Amino acid sequence: MTYFYREYHDGPDPLAPPYDVRSALDEMGDAILSGSTPLDALRDLLRRGLPGAPDRRGLDDLLRQVRRRRRELRDNTRLDGTLERVRALLDKAIGQERAELQRGSGGRPPGERSPDPFDDARFREAMLDALPTDTARAVQELAGYDWRSAAARQSFEELRDLLRREVLDSQFRGMREALANRDPTAMERVREMMSDLNDMLDRDARGEHTQDDFDRFMQKYGEMFPENPRNLEELVDQLARRAAAAQRLLASLTPEQREELAGLINQTLEQAGLAEQMRRLGDALHARRPDLAWGAPERVSGEQPMGMGDAVTALQELADLGDLEAALRQDYPGARLDDVDEAAIRRALGRSAVDDLEALRQVERELEAQGYLRRNRGKLELTPKAVRRLGETALRRVFASLDSGRRGDHDQRDAGTAGEPTGSTRPWRFGDEQPIDVVRTVVNAVRRGAPPERHGLTRHDVTDSDTGASPVGRVTGAGVRLSVDDFEVTETERRSAAAVCLLVDLSYSMALRGTWAAAKQTALALQALVASKFPQDAVQIIGFSNYARVLRPDELAGLEWDMVQGTNLHHALLIAGRHLDRHPDFEPVVLVVTDGEPTAHLMRNGAPRFEWPPSQETLTLTLAEVDKMTRRRATINVFMLAADDRLREFVDEVARRNGGRVFSPDADRLGEYVVSDFLRARRTR
């Protein structure tokens, strides 16, 4: 094989290490734990750029460059350049003709008329004097004029050639250069191209077009399309965007300028024999791309006049930049980085911006591919895998402020369902959660003398691990058939189990007081603590506002406060009581996080009733549920996040009836208080 080496120029660094998507998730986690939704956290990450990759621009940097480029175009674009040049050439031709006529009149002053009324020179001067002030109408009247001055005729032909090139360039980018050599056969070739193009579009509308048709068209006329479209759809997109920009050019002029330039365009197309073909093409493009901004004016304020082709290019770029800005803002429902047009990024900002965008896309894709994010009906959600990682982060934050000596554990040294292995085994029973002892299980199957089943295994002996006796069974190139009776499990130290209920206030006041983020972080931390250190515990997190509801672990991170009135602690305690009743042998732990006294209760018909100030019925029903918790031997510890007198009076009554404790932590220390109290309660029990 032959290898060639050259300097690397284009694209991202092929030797760069892959981006660690977990750092992106941790960056998102900081925002989520501070109260953001997963969607907002991802958008913030993509806007700022990738952590640990300072050379990569984020969406905000790309957006600033796009906006700067739009300002530059608007501040340096004047759209009437072609009209201005046409007027200048027209004035030049008329001036040259007048000079020639003056020389032909024997030096008679311009205002003095010849006594001969049929004097040809004087007749021509009268025609020039009577020309309309409208540029398009003046050019139209001079189209059949027999110029006396060769220089004037040349200036007028230069004017018409300018119009042909600019008008065609406004529809087909690069046509101005293609017609610059004034080849007499060039216009005939343009007419053939437009006829073939319209026929191809008609066949496509009937469903008869093939890629081979397009390839033959490009082979014949490819030099007229410098953007090198690969198929008819790309060609239509390029032509439609340019045609729409040409319409916006007319719409952006003053009414007088618009009328003059439209008249010049129509004359030019009629004289070139392209009017009907251009009308067919315009109708087809508009029908295929009605979504483009056809005829929408653009505000520009430049001082440098542009030709019609260049002005259309500038307006086309402005439209592309506008679409690009909207895509980069990512502020519409279901927004994704795949919506950003890579070709538009390349045209506007260059290849390096494409690489930056691809790096951001890769993070977004990898977060989904590696199971951290998912989209459910257009809504971005964290998966349980991501929630576990965020919970671990929240727990680390809490433990960072705790004394490590206070963490403790709560082991009970007898055989049970969790903890460290004791060294002994026992037969498996339905419902056991202990790990399977594989060696014991296989030995039991071999001892039972079950007939082997071929599995292509290598030769080995099975020996009694306790006595070291000679082999009790031999497996040669075969597997062992297992039965239920063969399984044994490893016994572990028994740990006491707890039924944990965390009741979190979701009412609007939590967001107003700035305590909602701390409450969500606390719920995640407690969920992670129980799942990692106390898997035998049954934890239930209950959110309550006007209603109460059980919160799944995977919805905690994306949870938002409820913009409703009502703090229905009554309903939350009802749900918590049912959870405790389902685990009668577990130690009950009830923790309540709230910033206000109960203002709602659940009526007999299942509807909530809100009253402010709290009604006596609400307080009575809520305290009745507190009494039920007391009879269940469940201590209720309340964490107050506000210093309201009514709230303090209510929680003092709860503590008096139940025997629980009341805490009033700062919001930023809520997690520390809740986790510490949970660990203290578990150690005590």
Image (cartoon, helix red, strand yellow):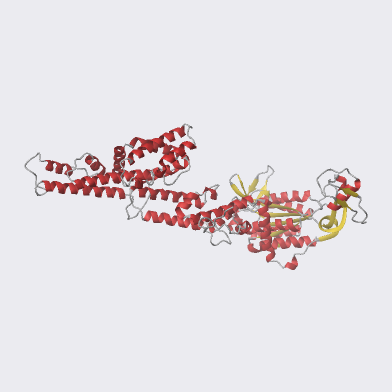
Res. 251 visible in picture: no
Percent across and percent down for residue 70 are 42, 54
Which residue lies most toward the left here? 115
Depicted 216 relative to depicted 635: above or below:
above
Which residue lies most toward the front here? 1
Name the quarter where the C terminus is drawn: bottom right
Res. 422 visible in picture: yes
Tally of numbered tags:
0
Instruction: In this rendered view, identify the residue nearer to me: 453 or 32.
Output: 453
Percent across and percent down for residue 54 are 55, 62
Query: Is residue 570 rendered to the left or right of residue 233?
Result: right
Residue 454 figure quarter = top right
Give me the residue at 83% from left, 46% from top: 477
Percent across and percent down for residue 300 are 36, 52
Query: Is residue 181 rendered to the left or right of residue 323?
Result: left
Depicted 57 relative to depicted 101: above or below:
below
Percent across and percent down for residue 546 are 64, 49
Give me the residue at 88% from left, 43% from top: 451
Instruction: In this rendered view, identify the residue nearer to me: 265 or 512.
Output: 265
Query: Is residue 256 rendered to the left or right of residue 573?
Result: left
